[in-house]
């Protein structure tokens, strides 16, 4: 994983807050990656590319 992607993951993890609790929504980098893959997969399905 290159530096830019790691920096973006860290930024998402620290800046993205749960709208209800106002606390960070992610506890670690793996949770960010999991949600990113799920989102990307759903986008590909919606565009009927897979």
Image (spheres, rainbow, N blue to C red):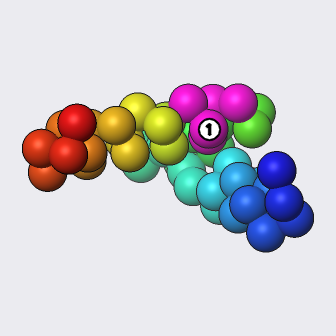
Q: In this view, does 1 lie to the left or right of 23?
A: right
Question: What is the magenta range?
Answer: 30-34
Camera sees residue 45: yes
Q: Quadrant of residue 3?
A: bottom right
Q: Is residue 2 left or right of residue 13?
A: right
Q: Which residue sits furthest bottom?
A: 4
Q: In which quarter of the image is residue 46?
A: top left
Where residue 38 sits: x, y (%)?
Answer: 40, 33
Residue 23 or 5: which is nearer the viewer?
5
Q: Would you name the residue on which mark 1 appears?
A: 33
Q: Which residue sits furthest front?
A: 50
Check the picture and name the quadrant holding the C terminus. Answer: top left
Judged from the image, the secondary structure of the residue bearing numbered disc 1 is helix
Residue 28 or 1: which is nearer the viewer?
1
User: What residue appears at the point 84 percent right and 60 percent down from the top-left corner?
Assistant: 2
User: What residue appears at the point 82 percent right and 50 percent down from the top-left corner?
Assistant: 1
Q: In this view, does 45 lie to the left or right of 9?
A: left
User: What residue appears at the point 64 percent right and 56 percent down from the top-left corner?
Assistant: 12
Q: Is residue 12 above or below residue 45?
A: below
Camera sees residue 21: no
Where residue 28 sits: x, y (%)?
Answer: 76, 33
Q: Main secondary structure of the magenta part?
A: helix
Q: Is residue 23 above or below residue 34?
A: below
């Amino acid at each position: 994983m290159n530096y830019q992607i790691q920096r973006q993951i860290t930024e998402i993890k620290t800046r993205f807050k749960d709208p209800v609790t106002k606390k960070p929504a992610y506890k670690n980098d793996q949770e960010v990656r999991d949600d990113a893959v799920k989102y990307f997969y759903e986008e590909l399905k919606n565009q009927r590319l897979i």
